[in-house]
Image: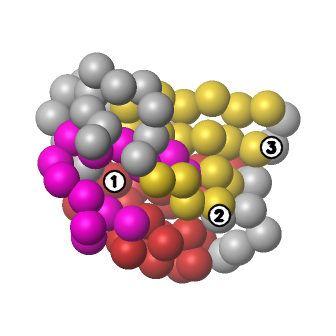
Amino acid sequence: MGGFDNPNPVLVVDGTRKECAGIIAGLEKAMQTLPDGALVRAIVDDVPGRLEVHLWAERKGHAVVAEKNNGMIFQITVAKGGAGKGVKA
C-alpha cells in the first residue's frame, strides 16, 4: 500500500460541506484499517476544517506531509504514524 515514497493516497476523505466533527470522524475511520505510512487525503472547504485536520494529525501522532489549495478547497495529505517530516499549519 501507500508509503512516504508514494505520493498517491490510499484513501480520500471528502470533508467538503461537512462540519469539523464529520471530517475528523471520516479520517478516524479511514486510518483504523491502514498500515503505518499509508497516506490519506482530506479535502476540506474552509480554514477551520483545514486547521482541525492539522491539529487532529498532531494529536494522533500522524504527519501532514503535503498540502495544496485551490481557492478555499484544501487538499491535505496525512501519513499514518507520523514518520517523516510534516507540513506546518
Region of the chain picked out in magenta, as a range: 30-42
Q: What amino acid is found at the position of numbered circle 3 in the picture? A: Met
The residue where tag 3 is placed is 72
Which of the marked residues, 2 or 1, is nearer the chain's N terminus? 2
Which of the 4 image quadrants contains residue 60?
A: bottom left
Asked whether residue 2 is in view, the answer is yes
Q: Residue at x 35, y 25 (%)?
A: 6
- Identify the coloring: secondary structure
Q: Is 21 on the left or on the right of 88, as rendered?
A: right
Q: What amino acid is found at the position of numbered circle 1 in the picture? A: Ala
Q: Is residue 34 above or below residue 24?
A: above
Q: Position of residue 83 (x, y in %)?
A: 15, 35
Label 2: few (<14), some (14–19) or many (≥20) C-alpha neighbours in 10 Å: many
Q: Is residue 31 magenta?
A: yes
Q: What amino acid is found at the position of numbered circle 2 in the picture? A: Gly
The residue where tag 1 is placed is 57
